[in-house]
Image: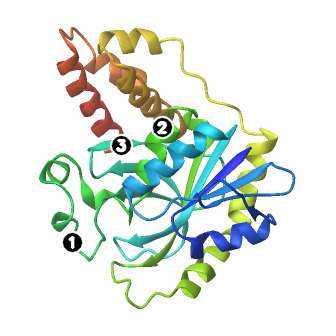
Amino acid sequence: MILFTAALYAEAVPVIEAYGMKKQEGFHNLYIDEEGRHALLITGSGMLSSYAAVSSCLEHLDVSGLICFGTAASLHGKTCIFRINRILDGADNRVFYPDQPDASVPEASLITGNLIYTGNLQDILPGKVCMENDLSSYDLYDMESAAVYSIARRKLSTHAMQFYRVVSDEGITDALTSVDLTDLVRTMVPVLKQACDEMEENTLQKWKEPAEFSMYAERLHCSETMKHELSDLIHYADNAGLDWKNLLNEMAGDIPDRQQGKEVLHAFRSRLCE
């Protein structure tokens, strides 16, 4: 089953209609099509709500892939439908790398935060996040993607998760109505259906961790969480055609403990995103 997630009902309507989904009894805000192949979960707005909703849903459904979609604020005036290639968790200062299938949809990077974006990231993100990340390199802002990714990553591998956003505003949302949100997401439906079809047909080769992965994870004294991040970073580098092996060989020499391993992992992430 492919699981779609959206924050708001107004965003979910076009996909519910496209697949003829019906609301499920006994599940909060869950819709499933007649064949039981596609489901849609309305998570609610915000990181905590999204995390809890997706966690509960994945416990009850046999999900093989996830497509998270919805609207986002533009940080630099870009207006388009985007597939997300990098997500900064503005609460925990972590970076995630969703799957990047070959597609004509433009890519964008995204920040997820706990507060509504009103025009200045420094006003709504923790100081550590602002200091340790080049915020100007990010294109969009929302309040759900990082939470959806972080909980879904416990069950699904990176190649089975895709994120799409359409720009709705630049941080001023008072003028947006539910009808506006529905109309915006309706333009995404062909993109979302194509992504779903490809995921179902498994036409995209599944990415496998390289043979050297265990060696690098051991060098960095990786915890399970660090292993997930290292795997995501290498996957991202492979897709981007970056020479991550030489970079890791250069950076991951004699590392005495996990704390220094975390610092090297953070530096590795920064180098890849330059």
Secondary structure beneath dot 2 equals helix
Q: Position of residue 230 (x, y in %)?
A: 40, 27
On the question of residue 187 being in view, the answer is no
Residue 95: numbered disc: 3
Could you give the CA–CA distance between mark 1 and mark 3, rounded to whole angstroms? Answer: 20 Å
What's the mark number on residue 236?
2
Which of label 2 and label 1 is nearer to you?
1
Count the marks: 3
Disc 3 residue type (three-letter): Val
Which quadrant would residue 224 be assigned to in this image? top left
**Which residue is located at x 46 percent, y 35 percent?**
237
3 vs 2, front mark: 3
Residue 195 image point, x, y percent = 70, 53
Q: What residue type is disc 1 on? A: Asn
Q: How much space separates mark 3 and mark 2, taking CA atoms? A: 11 Å
Question: In this rendering, would 177 be left or right of 170?
Answer: right
Q: Which mark is residue 120?
A: 1
